[in-house]
Image (cartoon, rainbow, N blue to C red):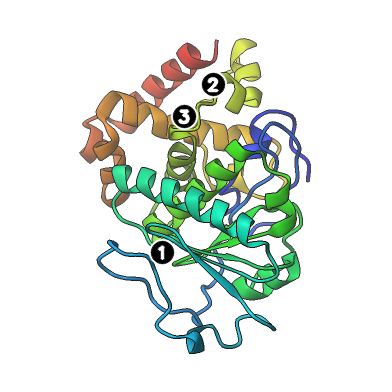
Amino acid sequence: MSVPKGRRAVLAGMLALMSAAPFAGTGPLLAGAAPLPRAPRHLPLYDPLYDAPYVPASPRDLHGLWPGAAVTVRGEHSLVIGHGVPAAVLRDLAARADRARATIAEIWGPVPAVILFPATDAEAAALAGAGSTRGLAAMATADRVIVLPSGYARLTATGRDVVITHELAHVATGATRGGRVPMWLSEGFADYAGYRDAGIAVRTAAAELAAEVRSGVLPGSLPGPADFAPGAPRLAQAYEEAWLACRFVAERFGEKALVRLYGSDVGSTLGLPVAEFTEAWRDYLRKELT
């Protein structure tokens, strides 16, 4: 599937809860998506205190991960393990992971920044237990991020920061939450974290939705599961709507309120009926996108 110019490139968490079909696009940040398959368990657990690099207990912990030698690069608070990837690329990724972790820590709290960078997309799919990965840049499992080499290579520097931050946000929040978290919140929060420090203009990141709003068309409600389904006609706009809903919450009620939504609901957390919240969000879209 190809998504029009603009926001398509930064759907780093696209179809995360749906074990989605491939996503492909071109644009300022290029493709990135994040299904949440079952996490592999042949790596060591991270430091629960989150105050030290995540170091394998022994070389045996990497046994069977990949054929041949794996290369481990430790950031200040991250661990990147690569196979057939230049050390300089792994060091760059570790620095990005450290920055992403710091952003998420400010918003949500500590998160394990463990990233696997395999030599091929096929290796990445095997690690994640995923099906097709065509067009993806990264995948989040329960406790780590797996990079898709082909997609990651096409990202700009800013795109890489957005994608890694988005994926670590999924790791931090446990995005599926047994289906108890609405998808607009799960994906919108991950995009909020990814875009928060990226310096990308709202109308650039939400180009498809902005075009609709400028033409006088506004969404009537927050996006639901069907809007995020593979092949949905307004898939890009659904992610943009979700992101801007979370951005609206953070700006009007504060980031702590956005985090509290994960254990509550709009009425209890924000003190607004859903209908009133929806109308305020629609007004926010008008203000930001026209």
Label 3 crowding class (10 Å Cα cut-off): few <14, some 14-19, many 20+?
many
Badge 1 vs badge 3, beta-carbon distance below 8 Å? no
Badge 2 vs badge 1, beta-carbon distance below 8 Å? no
Q: Nearest the camera: 36 or 59?
A: 59
Where does residue 64 sit, x and y in percent of width and height? 61, 87
Indicate which disc, 1 or 3, sits on the residue closer to the N terminus: 1
7 to the left or right of 185: right
Where is the C terminus found, in terms of image quarters? top right
Instruction: Between label 2 and label 1, give the one nearer the viewer.
Output: 2
Return the residue at label 1. 178
Q: CA distance from mark 1 to mark 3?
A: 24 Å
Q: CA distance from mark 3 to mark 2?
A: 12 Å
Q: Look at label 2 and name its amino acid.
A: Ala
Label 2: state its secondary structure: loop
Q: Look at label 3 and name its amino acid.
A: Leu
- Relative vertical location of residue 155 with respect to residue 201 in this rendering, above or below: below
Label 1: state its secondary structure: helix
Indicate which disc, 2 or 1, sits on the residue closer to the N terminus: 1
Label 2 crowding class (10 Å Cα cut-off): few <14, some 14-19, many 20+?
few
Marker disc for residue 244: 3
Where does residue 78 sit, x and y in percent of width and height? 43, 60
Q: Nearest the camera: 272 or 214?
A: 214
Return the residue at label 2. 201
Q: Nearest the camera: 254 or 184?
A: 254
Badge 3 vs badge 2, beta-carbon distance below 8 Å? no
Identify the residue at image location x=39%, y=69%. 54
Residue 228 occupies quadrant: top right
